[in-house]
Amino acid sequence: MAVGLAITSESGQNNGKITLYVVLSCMMAAMGGVIFGYDIGITGGVTSMEPFLKKFFHKVYLKMKLADDKVSNYCVFDSQLLTSFTSSLYVAGLVTSFFASYITKAFGRKPSIVVGGAAFLAGTGLGGAAFNVYMLIVGRLLLGVGVGFANQAVPLYLSEMALPRLRGAINNGFQLSIGIGALSANLINYGTEKIEGGWGWRMSLAMAAVPASVLTLGALFLPETPNSVIQRSHDKQKAKLMLQRIRGMEDVQAELDDLIKASSPSKTNNKQSLKLILKGRYRPQLVMALAIPFFQQVTGINVIAFYAPLLFRTIGLGESASLLSAVMTGVVGTGSTFISMFVVDKLGRRTLFMIGGIQMFVSQCIVGGIMALHLKDHGGLSKGSGIFFFFGGWVVVMTTFVYYFLPETKSVPLEQMEKVWQEHWFWKRIVGEVSDRQHKGEI
């Protein structure tokens, strides 16, 4: 869901230091990823806790307690109200993202981060103090607003603050922070489930206030990015001073000139931008910008991350065992993200894409096969195996798409990406040989 337009330096200058100023700014901003991951991971665990279900979703609780061999475990959690609670975050995030992009561009990255952090805090407060299901849903909606703003502004902020040579690693760091947030949520759920008195779920929901507070208070002191200053106010002197501060050096003129040059296309209005991006020379980038996020959604990973404890409960695990299994899933996910950060520049982006696709397909088939053979009908998930095969089919489509249509971009400077498309067996038919004169004419 994280999208945005980053103005980047074309020359890929490697000058500059990794200053403490930048490190602290990026750490505070990365809290947006932590709380997003936390909100994803916390819900599945909370909705598998019996005290939570007994208080807010009593019908689900009764079905779970009274279920026998004639009732499918899948049907136990079949509740429109429960689904409304879990899905409200995504609905609010989707709606918010439409205008969060405009606010981030028009008013800057910092205000969007502040708004997102404030929404996170408000949603956390309502959720932790809820005494009816409507407070829970409103709290989730506010969390969704926070997700819409934070996922729009935070990756953009991190990318623009980072040194050009470290931009990829910093962006991977945002994904890692999401994994850390989800793993933290799983660990907290596992601990709070053991609290006597049935109020552990309140602590699980309320603990989101920790990263939300760091994000909100930290954002008040975050500097605006030089890119945003140039894009909004055209104050070159202010942008230069900011660059000198975050790069830790006086000579930043080359990077400043690149940012000024790169900001020119972003000043076109929406109609002109749409016409520009629909041109043949930008067709590969447009397809990838749409296809890759789409495939990420239909691999089923979001279902695993969001509903892991519930999935484990539906196959017969107890409350504590299902939460522990979710912790193990979170450890593997976070560990894999951490490893990929170190090998992506050695193995390449496309290679990791292929390896991940093969692993996901094998995993989906194994789980689907186990469910089909050993957890038949009312003893487990009668239709659950088909869901895993469905996601496995999409993984095959994704991996095939990557193999045939996604070129390797390892060690390719940003300004040479056009050449990559022109040399690709398929995209060269779309892009063609575009001269520098034609390129200037389109811009």
Image: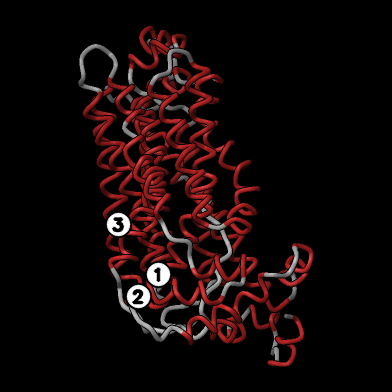
Q: Which residue is mark 3?
A: 336
Residue 360 position, x and y percent, is 40, 53
The image shows residue 49, relative to residue 243, as above or below, that is above
Q: Distance from label 1 to label 3 (Cα)?
A: 23 Å
Which residue corresponds to mark 1?
Answer: 162
What's the colour scheme?
A: secondary structure
Q: Nearer the viewer, mark 1 or mark 2?
A: 1
- Give me the C-alpha separation between circle 1 and circle 2: 17 Å
Q: Nearer the viewer, residue 137 or 235?
A: 235
- The answer to which of 153 and 62 lies nearer the viewer is 153
Q: Nearer the viewer, mark 1 or mark 3?
A: 1
* Dot 2 amino acid type: Asp
Q: Report whether 219 appears left or right of 96.
A: left
Q: In this rendered view, identify the residue nearer to me: 15 or 175.
A: 15
Q: Position of residue 325 (x, y in %)?
A: 26, 35
Q: Quadrant where the C terminus lies?
A: bottom right
Residue for point 41% across, 56% down: 222
Q: Considering only vertical position in the picture, is 427 above or below 98?
A: below
Q: Are marks 1 and 3 in contact (CB under 8 Å)?
A: no
Residue beneath label 2, please?
A: 345
Left or right, 247 with reference to 419: left
Instruction: Report the amino acid beneath label 3.
Output: Ser
Q: Residue at x 57, y 54 (%)?
A: 294
